[in-house]
Image: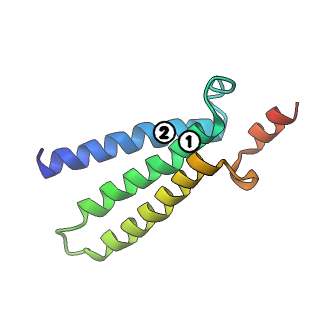
Amino acid sequence: MTPVGFLVMLFAIGIVFGGAGALAYAGVWRSWIGRIHQNVVFGWFWLGLAVLSMGLAASFIRTRVFGFSFVFALCAAVAGALGLWILLAGVPRRLRPRWYRVERER
């Protein structure tokens, strides 16, 4: 696989998973409730964000602004750790959207 193909794949995976998680966080996509566990859906957002950040970090490697690679790599590490924590340990109450907390209290 070429480096450009690898970057395109990272961006595509990040957009798909991050987009699905963002739609769930925003409350636009609510049909998943009861079928998919909250850890998985809300974890997708953070893992998608981590993959997007990895793609951005990789895209800045051989440029004059090489320092941005470190910033995006740090963002990828933080978002990836948060996504894995959410997948394995559960979503902390602070990271659940308001519409979801209201829906669950009914």
Looking at this view, name the residue that lies furthest to the front: 88
Vertically, is 102 above or below 96?
above
- Across and down, in percent, residue 79 comes to 50, 58
Q: Which mark is residue 38?
A: none
Image-based side of 89 in relation to 54, left or right = right
Task: Please identify the quarter of the rendering in which residue 104 is found.
Answer: top right
Q: Residue at x 52, y 52 (%)?
A: 84
Count of all numbered marks drawn on residues in the image: 2
Q: Are marks 2 and 1 in contact (CB under 8 Å)?
A: yes
Residue to which mark 2 is pinned: 19
Q: Quadrant of the C terminus?
A: top right
Kind of residue at badge 2: Gly
Image-based side of 58 in relation to 50, left or right = left
Q: Residue at x 69, y 52 (%)?
A: 95
Kind of residue at badge 1: Ala
Of residues 30 and 89, which is closer to you in this image? 89
Vertically, is 66 above or below 77?
below
Q: Secondary structure at mark 1?
A: helix
Q: Quadrant of the N terminus?
A: top left
Q: Residue at x 30, y 47 (%)?
A: 10
- Across and down, in percent, residue 51 comes to 38, 51
- How many angstroms separate mark 2 from mark 1 (CA)? 5 Å
- Across and down, in percent, residue 96 comes to 71, 47
* Label 1: few (<14), some (14–19) or many (≥20) C-alpha neighbours in 10 Å: many
Image-based side of 13 in relation to 84, left or right = left
Vertically, is 30 above or below 67?
above
Of residues 65 and 76, which is closer to you in this image? 76
Image-based side of 65 in relation to 33, left or right = left
Residue to which mark 1 is pinned: 22
- Across and down, in percent, residue 12 comes to 33, 40
Q: Residue at x 31, y 69 (%)?
A: 69
